[in-house]
Amino acid sequence: MVILYTRTVCPKCTLIKTLLDSAEVAYEQVNLDFDEKAEVELKEKGFMGLPIALDEGQYYADVPSIQAFIAQKA
C-alpha cells in the first residue's frame, strides 16, 4: 500500500489525494501535523516539501513524479 505524507493545510497534498482516489489507488495518509516521528524521519532522509509518496521502498517527492507514479499504478 502507498503511504502518502501530508499536512492538514497543503493544496498539493489535496490534489494528490484526489488523483489517488480517482485512480482507485489504495493509500494510507500520514499527516505530519500529528506524527512528529514521521516528520523527523523524512527530514533525516533529506525531504523538505510535501506531498511525499512511498511505495515499496521508493519515495516520490514532487507532484510530477507522484502523478507519473499514479499513472503507472492505475
Image: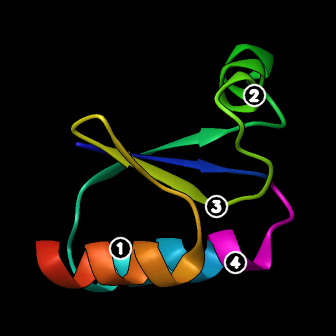
Q: Position of residue 37 (x, y in %)?
A: 72, 13
Q: CA distance from mark 2 to mark 1?
A: 22 Å
Real-space CA distance between mark 4 and mark 2, rounded to the nearest whole angstrom: 17 Å
Categorize mark 1 by other alpha carbons within 10 Å: few (<14), some (14-19), many (20+). many
Which of disc 2 and disc 4 is earlier in sequence? 4
In space, the residues marked 1 and 4 are separated at their CA atoms by 12 Å
Q: Is residue 21 left or right of residue 18?
A: left
Asked if the residues shown at circle 1 and circle 3 are in contact, with their CB atoms under 8 angstroms apart, the answer is no
The residue segment tinted magenta is 8-13
Are dots 3 and 2 in contact, CB under 8 Å?
Answer: no
Q: Residue 35: which disc?
A: none
* Residue on which disc 2 sits: 39
Is 1 above or below relative to 11?
above
Q: Is residue 74 left or right of residue 38?
A: left
Q: CA distance from mark 1 to mark 3?
A: 12 Å
In the rendered image of this protein, does residue 28 appear above or below residue 9?
A: above
Q: Earlier in the sequence, mark 3 or mark 4?
A: 4
